[in-house]
């Protein structure tokens, strides 16, 4: 058996596969060359850089497709499973890292660290310009309540925040999370809104102009979930008008970003990161181990 880790794999994950007696290649094969070369492998492990669509699936004899991460937007999951190919991911491995990035954006926006850094680099001393707000006592609304949102809730409660969530997932009362009956209720009561949902490719953005209009004036929006879940044009307009006080964005409609997204990225009330939610040493180690174990288990069935 032979596995291709086309977008890299942590040493811990490599060790899992090698200890299982399975051959592993970690060199990157360009997307266009996979159609010819992927037939030499029983399984492929990808991150977000490599796509595994129907045409590639049909051109190979894969038994397992592994996604070293949470979202599987770059894989035609249903089609692969229809063809008898196991598709696995690592839904919990990067939860802590992404949750902590949510708060990195929140603290940056509430205390202007991203703006004051640039000002001081230019020799300015903007002490009077950046009077911020505290998180304590404020309400954060979580759209979706999966593994990452649960980690956000833990940290928010630890900071003395109020937490509400709109989701079909079970929310345990002991977590002191208020359950909103619908999205509009959450939007109306939250000082901060954080998305933790996949992209609905058919419906498009979950947060658009209509949803932003229902948010509190001066609210802050955080998206460390999936690009496209927020209408970027509507968000930019809300920032320009002052309807929203800020936005923390880690995921984008186009990645890497295009020139058309420059105005949003450069807006002074935007804290921007290039899809680094799971990019910590600890998360990469956990992701590598978990995806390696899951792929090995599927191959040995």
Image: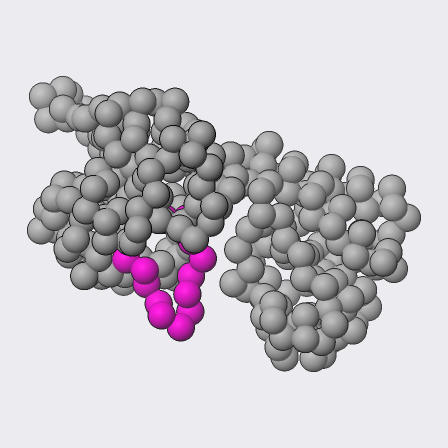
Question: Image height check: is 134 above or below 285?
Answer: above
Name the spot of residue 39 as percent of width and height, x first: 79, 72
- Give the main secondary structure of the magenta stretch: loop
Name the spot of residue 275 as percent of width and height, x first: 44, 48
| Residue segment shown in magenta | 195-207
Quadrant location of the C terminus in the rendered image: bottom right
Residue positioned 80% across, 52% down in the render = 297
Asked whether the viewer can see residue 33, the reply is no
Please identify the quarter of the rendering in which residue 49 is found. Answer: bottom right
Residue positioned 61% across, 71% down in the render = 78
Question: Image height check: is 113 above or below 14?
Answer: above
Front one among 225 and 105: 225
Query: Residue at the right extreme?
Result: 21
Name the spot of residue 170 as percent of width and height, x first: 47, 45
Residue positioned 40% across, 73% down in the render = 202
Question: Image height check: is 81 above or below 28?
Answer: below
Front one among 219 and 142: 142
Front one among 11 and 90: 90
Quadrant location of the N terminus in the rendered image: bottom right
Q: Is residue 64 magenta?
A: no
Asked whether the viewer can see residue 138, the reply is yes
């Amino acid at each position: 058996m032979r596995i291709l880790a086309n977008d890299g794999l942590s040493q811990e994950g490599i060790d899992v596969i090698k200890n299982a007696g399975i051959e592993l290649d970690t060199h990157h094969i360009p997307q266009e060359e996979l159609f010819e070369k992927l037939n030499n492998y029983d399984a492929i492990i990808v991150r977000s850089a490599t796509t595994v669509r129907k045409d590639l699936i049909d051109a190979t004899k894969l038994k397992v497709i592994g996604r070293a991460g949470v979202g599987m937007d770059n894989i035609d999951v249903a089609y692969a499973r229809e063809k008898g190919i196991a598709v696995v991911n690592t839904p919990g491995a990067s939860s802590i890292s992404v949750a902590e990035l949510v708060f990195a954006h929140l603290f940056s926006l509430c205390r202007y660290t991203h703006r004051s850094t640039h000002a001081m680099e230019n020799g300015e001393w903007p002490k009077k310009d950046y009077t911020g707000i505290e998180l304590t006592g404020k309400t954060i609304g979580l759209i979706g309540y999966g593994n990452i949102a649960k980690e956000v809730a833990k940290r928010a409660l630890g900071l003395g925040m109020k937490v509400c969530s709109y989701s079909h997932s079970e929310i345990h009362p002991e977590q002191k999370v208020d359950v909103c009956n619908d999205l509009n209720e959450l939007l109306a009561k939250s000082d901060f809104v954080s998305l933790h949902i996949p992209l609905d490719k058919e419906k498009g953005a979950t947060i658009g102009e209509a949803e932003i209009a229902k948010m509190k004036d001066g609210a802050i929006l955080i998206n460390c979930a999936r690009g496209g879940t927020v209408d970027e044009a509507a968000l930019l307009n809300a920032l320009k008008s002052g309807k929203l006080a800020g936005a923390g964005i880690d995921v984008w409609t186009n990645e890497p970003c295009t020139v058309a997204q420059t105005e949003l990225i450069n807006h002074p009330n935007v804290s921007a990161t290039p899809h680094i939610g799971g990019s910590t040493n600890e998360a990469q180690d956990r992701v590598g181990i978990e995806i390696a174990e899951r792929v090995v288990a599927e191959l040995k069935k």
